[in-house]
Image (spheres, grey):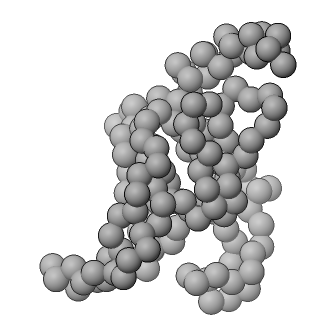
Amino acid sequence: MPGLDRALAGVTRWFSTNILIDTVRITLPATTEPVLNTSTGNLEYPEGAVLYEGPGAVFNANAAAEISATPDVQQPWIQETKSRYQLYTPLDAPVAPKDAVVTVTAVHDPARSALLGRAWTCPDPGQAATVEIARRTPLDQIRIPGGAT
């Protein structure tokens, strides 16, 4: 659809310039064993391979998107909800695979620094469509023991 792509080029440029203004990182989860951090006493997984680092945006979904979910490794009871978010990246960014980890490494506004230090996992691969202005990937926030995120 070259004609439609040309028609959407301005929207794509505007979205990239005005919305994708923070820096995000997409990594594959580490496949090695965790390592003991002697200063904290916690086991920490080494960082996985970086698939993408560049412009992006993380949006939280509205309350209607909060759904009951089945238990996962960090949720021992069935009525826990998932934290639904969306990652937006430029069209030239790779499609994030299932189970990739997303972090925000820099924010455009210091008032948005609450995003730093949080991590999300991709419950499904990044979405792809024949008509797009940005790449969209569903996210679930990773809960850290101790409740920081």
**Would residue 24 be found to the left or right of residue 43 on screen?**
right
Based on the displayed image, in which of its 4 quarters is residue 130 positioned? top right
How many numbered circles are shown? 0
For the residue pair 103 and 54, the one nearer the viewer reads as 54
Extreme residue in the bottom direction: 76
Residue at the image position 77 percent from the left and 73 percent from the top: 68
**Would residue 33 be found to the left or right of residue 120 on screen?**
left
Q: Is residue 103 above or below residue 20?
A: below
Based on the displayed image, in which of its 4 quarters is residue 49 positioned? bottom left
Residue at the image position 36 percent from the left and 40 percent from the top: 106
Q: Position of residue 147 (x, y in %)?
A: 45, 74
Residue at the image position 63 percent from the left and 61 percent from the top: 98
Based on the displayed image, in which of its 4 quarters is residue 122 positioned? bottom right
- Locate the N terminus by quadrant: top right
Q: Position of residue 146 (x, y in %)?
A: 40, 79
**Would residue 11 be found to the left or right of residue 38 on screen?**
right
Q: Is residue 43 above or below residue 6?
A: below
Q: Position of residue 114 (x, y in %)?
A: 41, 50
Q: Is residue 68 above or below residue 27?
A: below
State whether residue 40 appears in this view. Answer: no
Extreme residue in the left direction: 39
Residue at the image position 16 percent from the left and 83 percent from the top: 38
State whether residue 49 appears in this view. Answer: yes
Q: Position of residue 103 (x, y in %)?
A: 44, 52
